[in-house]
Image (cartoon, rainbow, N blue to C red):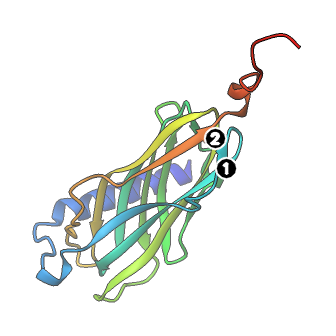
Amino acid sequence: MRELKNGLACITILAACFALAANPVQAEERTKSQIELFLQDQNAVLKRGSFVDISVKSQDVPGLFGIQFELVYDPDLLELRGKDSVEISEPFQAWVIKNDPEAGRIQVAATRKSLPADAAEDLPLAKFRFRTLTGGNAEVSLQEIKAVDAVPREIQLSSAEEPVVEISIKDPAANVGKDRREGGS
């Protein structure tokens, strides 16, 4: 119950920070600020039942203090087993991690443990470990991304599109019997 109250209080604080962000940080040298999504091992052959790690990182984000985003995935192909499958990077403290496995959505809100420098930084933000459930092509995307500095002001991110990772999962059971040829012996 206490964790729920703390989580709701943090969501309220983050929402107030975003509402107060009347002066977005906009400088010409900061136009490349992005939050990116990475498949940890892009060369891995994923089979049903294997694990895949997806990372969220910031690139050239100045003074990042708070971050909020939603990770959306296909729950028919990927399973996020719970909070143990989510790792928030060391400089940050997660205030909210809400997983809706039926809808394939996980919401994350985190703040820095200490005040950041104003210089643009490349930072790991979080890592998610999924288990593959069946064969197919799955997409994982970041949505509803919001970032603030310590003032608080909203940080404008240059990503016009939502970051997406595509995952191809092979189902060995689907190939059983396909190598046999028709005909007699």
Q: Which badge, 1 or 2, comes first in the chain's sequence?
A: 1
Identified at 24% across, 61% down, the residue is 159
Q: Is residue 114 above or below residue 109?
A: below
Q: Position of residue 25 (x, y in %)?
A: 16, 75
**Amino acid type at image mark 2:** Thr
Q: Which residue is rendered at x = 46% and y = 32% of the image?
A: 103
For residue 145, above or below residue 152: above
Residue assigned mark 2: 132
Foreground of the two, 78 or 148: 78
* Within-10-Å neighbours for mark 1: few <14, some 14–19, many 20+: some
| 162 lies left or right of 97 | left
Kindly give the residue lying farthest to the top in the view shown. 184
**Under tag 2, what secondary structure?**
strand
Which quadrant of the figure contains the C terminus? top right
Residue at 40% across, 59% down: 10
Where residue 177 sits: x, y (%)?
76, 21
Q: Amino acid at mark 1?
A: Phe
CB under 8 Å between callouts 1 and 2? yes
Residue that lies at the very extreme toward the right in this rendered image: 185
Measuring from the top left, give residue 15's x and y in whole percent.
Answer: 27, 56
**Horizontal placement of 127 versus 120: left or right?**
right
* Left or right of 152 on screen, residue 174: right
Q: Secondary structure at mark 1?
A: strand
* Residue picked out by circle 1: 51
Q: CA distance from mark 1 to mark 2?
A: 6 Å
The residue at the point 25 percent across, 53 percent down is 161
Q: Is residue 14 visible?
A: yes
